[in-house]
Amino acid sequence: MSSPGGTTAIQSEPMEVDCSIMQPSEETEEKDTEPGMPCQICVCSNVDQTETFKKALASFNVPVVLVEDPDYFVHAKFDGPIIIVTSEFTNNFLRFHKPPQSRILGPTALIEMSIKVENLSIPLRTRIRPLFCHSMQNIVICITGFRNKQETMKLIDITKHMGGKLRKEMNYQVTHLIANCVSGEKYKYAMGFRVPVLTKEFVLSAWEKRYDVNFKADEPSFMNQYKLKLFQGAKVNFFGFSEEDEEQLQELLLSNGGKPSLSSDEPLTTHVVVDDSKVTCMPNVPCTSTYVVKARWFWMSIQNSECADESKYLFGKNFRTPDRAAKRKRLMEVVEEPHSSPRKSRKKRTSDIDGTPRYSCGSLLDYTTSPDNFLATDESDVMIKGNSPRHQVFKELCQTESNYVNVLRVLIEHFKNPLEEKLNTNECILNQAEMKIIFGDLCPIFDTHKDLLKDLKYLEQNYSDSVSIGEVFVKHCTAFKKVYPPFINFFQDSNSLLKEKEKNSRFLAFLKLCYMNLRDLGLPEIDKQTLPDLLIRPVQRLGSISLLLNDILKNTSKSSTDHQKLSEALDGIRTVMTFLNENKQRQDNQRSLFDIYQDIENCPPQLINSHRSFVLKCDVIELSNMLSHRGDCITLFLFTDVVEVCKKRSKYVNVLKSPNTSKMSLSTYKTQAKHPIDKTYKHIKLLSMTSIKKVYNVEDEAHDNDRQIFALRCRGSDEVIETTYSFNIIDDTLDKMSFLRELCRQASAVYCINFDKFLEDISLANASSFNIETHESSNSTLGRAIKFASKQVGRTLSLNRTPSTLRKVMSSMKVRVADT
């Protein structure tokens, strides 16, 4: 790389390593010396003397000498200390051309020192060590992992030339660690104390910017470009994983600086990652220094963006040696008592919260149509068979409610809370808005169902045919109506965001670790339930409760006091579900309304109305030449009380019919176009339903209704005469009669009359008697086309010099058009 002065930078010349620089000497001391003001400043010819540099020289008020020959410093004698300004910082120059009592500076360092003198009134200070710039003035580095001594010495020299300091060992003074692999005690120390670990390119790139006075190497934006990848220098083999999982792991490994190993015993393999949920034996490794770790080590490294400590995730660390004495004793018992019953398994103690098990395997098993159905054991089946049908369904309701509460607890304690703890920290994975979209308001739902479960457990413990099950649900129906809408309304957005965030390796690693944690807690089937599978349970729960309450009602005698309460509870649950569906539909309509408004240029603001909702869209060609021009492509957006008429921009008309864009969606075309346009449509007219007086269905019997023509007779409140607009539907997916009936239905709702009075069928032959245009082209359209073609030909060929024959042809075309 060439410097501004035309000299060659240190990268292009082989550096002669001065190993003595590592020994304690006066040149490696950090202390400053003050031999006094220099008698002169010697500027070498390789320095680019810019205006800034000349001003810096003049600010010191010291005689300046321009030196052409570097040997001048060897033979000349000086009366006092001097400063040598040069752009050549090679060891040859520094060792053989440096006179005693001299200081070597780079042009950047001289400019920086002049700025300090002006701003801080600091006198010029001389230091023994050559200094090119101060870009690493506040940096203390430690170097590890480099086996090439010459490469290490080069990094040391460059760091010192930029004002940086070095330490042989890691301590509290070190600010940056320069490494080439993720191993060693220095790397672990840096990870433990949050010391940035960077590659050697950090030092080399900073040296390339040595002529920039404003550059500082400790800027975060610069350092982040050279962070050591978390698997740099590691060769990893994945043992026991499926092909799909192994492919995903290898892709993440390569993107983070690692190299895959084909087998666990391949030479130079540094890590063997084992799927500890399947593998029970130790794999073969090439040497004792190879780490055999669990899959948790890999995902923890991905999540934290740093290589985790292998000693915490060693595979086989907790292996237990078989107890031979116990096995021999068990064998003797079997021999002595061949006809004895099998030994019963020891019961495990479960920790209860609110009288319910903290976790239940049944809560995550879904083998029936009901998402919360409980997979009962043989013992529970025997117990339930002795109960009445009503009691059996009630116990199933209690069990599914317990499972559902456990699912909500898992979502909050193992997914939501850990992500919230990372907010506003360097380990943040999701921001506050993303958390709100994905998890919604789960806590109120959890609190409500926890109270419901407590009431159900009390009834279960004191069950009799006279207990009122319906009263419990009547009590909580109001709470259901309050806590569920915030979650249901954003559920689709939650799914979309989850699919997008799963492409983020850190979020994917977080999910993998959550599944492993739940598996370790005694839920072996949790890995079959992903986060989207768990988040859909609140959407399904009220429907499941409704089915179970209906079954309980069928098995309850009409003479029972609980029959009326159950009917009331069932009606309440269904009312809540209807309210949720309507609320969700209303919100979706409002969102569609805003999307349409944002996509139409010059759209009137009055289109946005809280009582208005979008119905459907229809693409047509105008035949009447009243709104835009005959033959133009127009889009009709039908709402509950208005019709928005807009024109599709010319760049989007038939764009999908082009051979180059036949497989491209409209949104993709908008983003990839040479001149992207935000607005797809341009506003023409907003028709109120009160202005539509008649809807005509024009039937073309001769052509078997190939053309889907219809017309609207309208007259606004500020218009004197009626106007008839005619259109031809070009949307093959839309049925004309379905659209017309829906249009008449919305208009009749505004007028409060029967919609059949709006719709009238007429034949194509009689269309002219109703002032309905049915032709797609007109003289004006063709005339505009010829006029446009004339302009283009005139610009290209200059009609003044065009042969008279061409002008005659153009004029004859206009005459023929006029005659038609």
Image: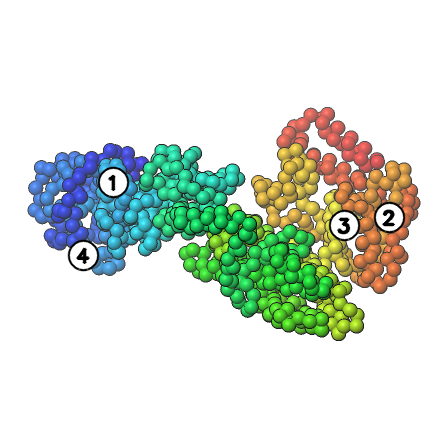
Tag of residue 627: 3
Please give left or right for residue 124 compared with residue 399 in the image: left
Q: Dot 2, crowdedness within 10 Å: few (<14), some or many (≥20)?
A: many
Give me the C-alpha separation between circle 3 and circle 1: 77 Å
Q: Where is residue 577? Give x, y as percent.
A: 70, 63
Give me the C-alpha separation between circle 3 and circle 4: 80 Å
Please state which amino acid type lies under the numbered disc 1: Thr
Quadrant where the image shows the N terminus = top left
Please give left or right for residue 85 compared with residue 490 in the image: left
Near-viewer residue (181 or 281): 281
The first of marks 4 and 1 along the sequence is 4
Task: Tell me if I can see residue 571 in this picture.
Answer: no
Tag of residue 521: none
Do the residues under discs 3 and 2 have CB atoms within 8 angstroms?
no
Residue bearing the label numbered 1: 152
The first of marks 2 and 1 along the sequence is 1
* Secondary element at image label 4: loop
Q: Where is residue 792? Give x, y as percent.
A: 66, 34
Residue bearing the label numbered 2: 697
